[in-house]
Image: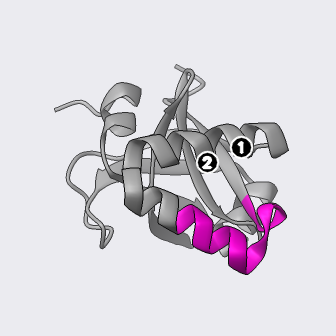
Amino acid sequence: MTTTVKSLGAGSYVRVTSYRRDGRAVSTPVWVVPDGDGIAVWTARDSGKVKRIRRDGTVLVGPCDARGRLTGEEVPGQAHILDAEGTARVRAALASKYGLLGKLTLWGSRVRRGLEGTVGIHIAVGDPSA
């Protein structure tokens, strides 16, 4: 089975693998929504993955379960941090896709961190050199 943007965006979770300065891979399962020609995820602004993506947006993404166990193949991608408008778009998409659980999670995050405490990340999936 080939992993595509459509299949990644339709899943509940993706595993995003970003890279530390020394090259070590760090993988994290996150909720996912389709976002134009790619996918988007949402996370705390001060998370390690945000710091790693700011430094180097090269990532691997693949469908997974809630614990991060892959359920399909990983594909390369290029990630970038979204601005406030893009992040709001991702929040709305998450609330729509994940229903009550999504809305409660977003509300809890807003209470803990405020709107500025989280960011959306857009991931263009596929090899840009292909």
**Is residue 14 something that shows in the picture?**
no
The Cα atoms of the two marked residues, 2 and 1, are separated by: 5 Å
Q: Which residue is drawn at 30% across and 32% down?
A: 7
Magenta stretch: dominant SS? helix
What x and y, as percent, mark residue 41?
Answer: 55, 50
Out of 2 and 93, give the one closest to the viewer.
93
What x and y, as percent, mark residue 3?
Answer: 30, 34
Instruction: State yes or no: discs 2 and 1 in contact (Cβ < 8 Å).
Output: yes
For the record, the magenta segment spans 105-118
Please determine whether, in this image, residue 121 is positioned above or below residue 18: above
The amino acid type, in three-letter code, at marker 2 is: Arg
Describe residue 70's horizontal placement relative to residue 95 as left or right: left
Q: Residue at x 20, y 53 (%)?
A: 71
Out of 77 and 67, give the one closest to the viewer.
67
Residue position for label 2: 91
The amino acid type, in three-letter code, at marker 1 is: Ala
Instruction: Let me know if residue 106 is in the magenta part.
Output: yes
Q: 10 Å neighbourhood of mark 2: few (<14), some, or many (≥20)?
A: many
What x and y, as percent, mark residue 47?
Answer: 69, 74
Describe residue 30's horizontal placement relative to residue 118 as left or right: left
Residue 68: image quadrant is: bottom left
Residue position for label 1: 88
Q: Is mark 2 on a helix, strand or loop?
A: helix
**Is residue 127 something that shows in the picture?**
yes
Number of marks present in the image shown: 2
Q: Which residue is drawn at 67% across and 49% down?
A: 120
